[in-house]
Image (spheres, grey):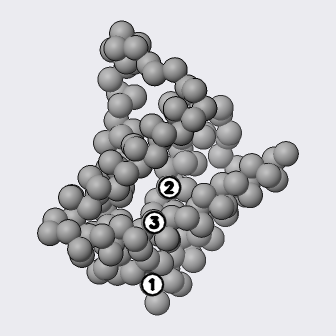
Amino acid sequence: MHYLLIAAALAAGALMPIQGSLNARLGRVLPNPFQSSLTNFVVGALVLAVLCLAVRAPWPTPSALAAIPPRLYLGGVLGAIFVSTVLILVPRIGVLNVLASAVVGQLLVSILIDHFGWFDVPVQPVSFTRVAGALSLVGGLFLIQK
């Protein structure tokens, strides 16, 4: 089962360069990159609304939404920053440079999140092999830049 979940994560990750390339192209079609990011999120929201209807997920009540700690809404802010950054950088430095850098940044912060259990994730202590793997990716990023 674990390997199926890893395969699903790999498949989702494989979509990122396609998304980044499409968003970068959209950024050249529309007059402002933030319009492109907004278009991306509107289309994504519509797809998710259809999926919620299809699986008959109940809509949250206004009181349930108001009870959510405000910091949890920052995920949407961070998503907007990430999509906009990728959209702006891909035409300048290419998909590989952008996503390799993003992956290394994600992994370095992920080590900290796992080690300290931030955001209520299960604690996964830092280990030599995790650090070695992360450093290998940093080395890979360096080689990609050459």
For the question of whether residue 17 can be seen, the reply is yes
3 or 1: mark nearer the eye: 3
Label 2 residue SS = helix
Q: Nearer the viewer, residue 2 or 61?
A: 61
Q: Nearer the viewer, residue 5 or 126?
A: 5
Q: Which residue is mark 2?
A: 106
User: In the rendered image of this protein, does residue 16 appear above or below residue 93?
Assistant: above
Label located before the other in sequence (1 or 2): 2
Label 1 residue SS = helix
Q: Residues within 10 Å of mark 1 (few under 14, many from 20)?
A: few
Name which residue type carries label 1.
Answer: Gln
* Residue 87, horizontal then vertical, whole percent: 32, 67
Q: Could you tell whether 129 is left or right of 135 in the image?
A: right
Give residue 32's quadrant in the image: bottom left
* Residue 91, horizontal then vertical, whole percent: 31, 79
Residue at the (65%, 33%) spot, across then down:
123
Name which residue type carries label 2.
Answer: Gln
User: In the rendered image of this protein, does residue 111 appear above or below residue 50?
Assistant: below
